[in-house]
Image: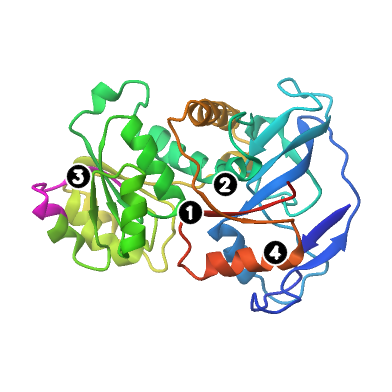
């Protein structure tokens, strides 16, 4: 089958940064689904993995995570899917990726695809939706089904215009929170408001002063999606006593968790791949989350963040998609599709 791979770190403008390869079509076993890839999107993790590669790999690596596709075969232990089902998912960090004609994926991290959206609109959603959902409803322990319980609670989303921020804002509003999101350019401010933010503050200026100007001394929850080190002192100042902070970005240098002790605040990491990477007992929860997301998308309560489509799925288009994401100017999601 056809796939797109890389074997070294090269500037994305280099024609060899991604190239076409032919690999055997895999066979499903156990809980695996064999999925024909119809559409896939590019996330910052894709560019980070490619750019962090050292030396020359012995074999080309195929990456890519977000997918919309059709199940063509199933393993012996599969219970929730059958051939012909249309599915969407974000995959595993340990397995060959979506930049290929076919891919194996464990059914426990797969959802039935929405029926009211296009393939590209669907493929834009899994990774960011899973990340936002786990951050809000698992790490922060919020409840989307009882929004009245969250009335008066505040969430600060740092990088509200990004892929995860755009979904987190929508989900938090469904859960009844007041959302303050950060954005700095006119177009990202407009995008963030379009996706439900009650207030927008500029992360290139003093975030603490801007939040105080809204009449708030602190916020109950902070979702950090861009440069934890840069914003750490602001986070410490703004988090409420017994509040919760969740970060997805990692840290270039150690952060001072002791600064949270007096407030008894909670800090947690969110990594969407943890469940599939370690095959945790709650791995099946990602199937359940995607089924909930499907329902919200089909009901029009959650909006896809697709903004750019490239057709078809080729090495040249994949290079273009990575260049867009690496520019750090991308608003919404870029999707490659064969339909």
Residue 108 seen in this snapshot: yes
Q: CA distance from mark 1 to mark 2?
A: 9 Å
- CB contact under 8 Å: marks 1 and 4: no
**Mark 2 lies on residue:** 124
Q: In which quadrant of the rendered view does residue 67 lie?
A: top right
First in sequence, mark 3 or 4: give its number. Answer: 3
Q: CA distance from mark 3 to mark 4?
A: 42 Å
Q: Residue at x 76, y 30 (%)?
A: 31
**Mark 4 lies on residue:** 317
- CB contact under 8 Å: marks 1 and 2: yes
Q: Looking at the picture, does residue 235 appear above or below residue 229?
A: above
Q: In which quadrant of the rendered view does residue 35 lie?
A: top right
Helix, strand, or loop for circle 2?
Answer: loop
Q: Nearer the viewer, mark 1 or mark 3?
A: 1
First in sequence, mark 1 or 2: give its number. Answer: 2
- CB contact under 8 Å: marks 2 and 3: no
Label of residue 145 in the image: none
Mark 1 nearby-residue class (10 Å; few <14, some 14–19, many ≥20):
many
Q: Position of residue 277 (x, y in %)?
A: 63, 44
Q: CA distance from mark 2 to mark 4?
A: 16 Å
Label of residue 219 in the image: 3
**Mark 1 lies on residue:** 332
Mark 4 nearby-residue class (10 Å; few <14, some 14–19, many ≥20):
some
Q: Position of residue 300 (x, y in %)?
A: 46, 30
Left or right of 128 in this view: 251: left
Left or right of 159 in this view: 259: left
């Amino acid at each position: 089958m056809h796939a797109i791979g890389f074997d070294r770190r090269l500037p994305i403008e280099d024609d060899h940064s991604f190239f076409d390869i032919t690999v055997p079509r895999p066979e499903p076993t156990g809980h695996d689904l064999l999925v024909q890839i119809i559409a896939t999107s590019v996330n910052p993790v894709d560019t980070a993995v490619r750019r962090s590669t050292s030396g020359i790999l012995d074999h080309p690596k195929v990456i890519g995570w977000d997918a919309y596709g059709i199940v063509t075969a199933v393993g012996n232990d599969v219970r929730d899917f059958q051939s012909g089902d249309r599915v969407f998912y974000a995959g595993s960090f340990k397995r060959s990726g979506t930049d290929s004609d076919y891919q194996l994926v464990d059914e426990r991290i797969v959802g039935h695809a929405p029926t009211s959206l296009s393939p590209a609109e669907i493929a834009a959603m899994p990774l960011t939706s899973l990340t936002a959902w786990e951050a809000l409803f698992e790490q922060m322990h919020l409840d989307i089904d009882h929004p009245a319980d969250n009335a008066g609670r505040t969430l600060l989303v740092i990088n509200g215009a990004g892929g995860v921020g755009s979904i987190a804002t929508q989900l938090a509003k469904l859960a009844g929170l007041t959302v303050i999101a950060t954005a700095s350019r006119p177009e990202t401010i407009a995008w963030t408001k379009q996706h439900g933010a009650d207030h927008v503050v500029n992360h290139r200026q003093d975030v603490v002063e801007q939040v105080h100007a809204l009449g708030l001394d602190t916020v109950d929850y902070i979702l950090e999606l861009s440069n934890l080190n840069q914003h750490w002192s602001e986070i410490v100042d703004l988090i409420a006593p017994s509040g919760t902070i969740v970060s997805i970005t990692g840290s270039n240098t150690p952060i001072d968790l002791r600064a949270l002790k007096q407030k008894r605040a909670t800090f947690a990491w969110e990594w969407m791949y943890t469940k599939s990477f370690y095959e945790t007992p709650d791995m099946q929860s990602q199937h359940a989350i995607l089924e909930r997301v499907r329902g919200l998308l089909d009901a029009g309560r959650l909006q896809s963040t697709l903004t750019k489509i490239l057709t078809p799925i080729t090495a040249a288009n994949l290079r273009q998609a990575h260049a867009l994401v690496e520019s750090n100017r991308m608003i919404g999601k870029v999707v490659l599709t064969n339909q």
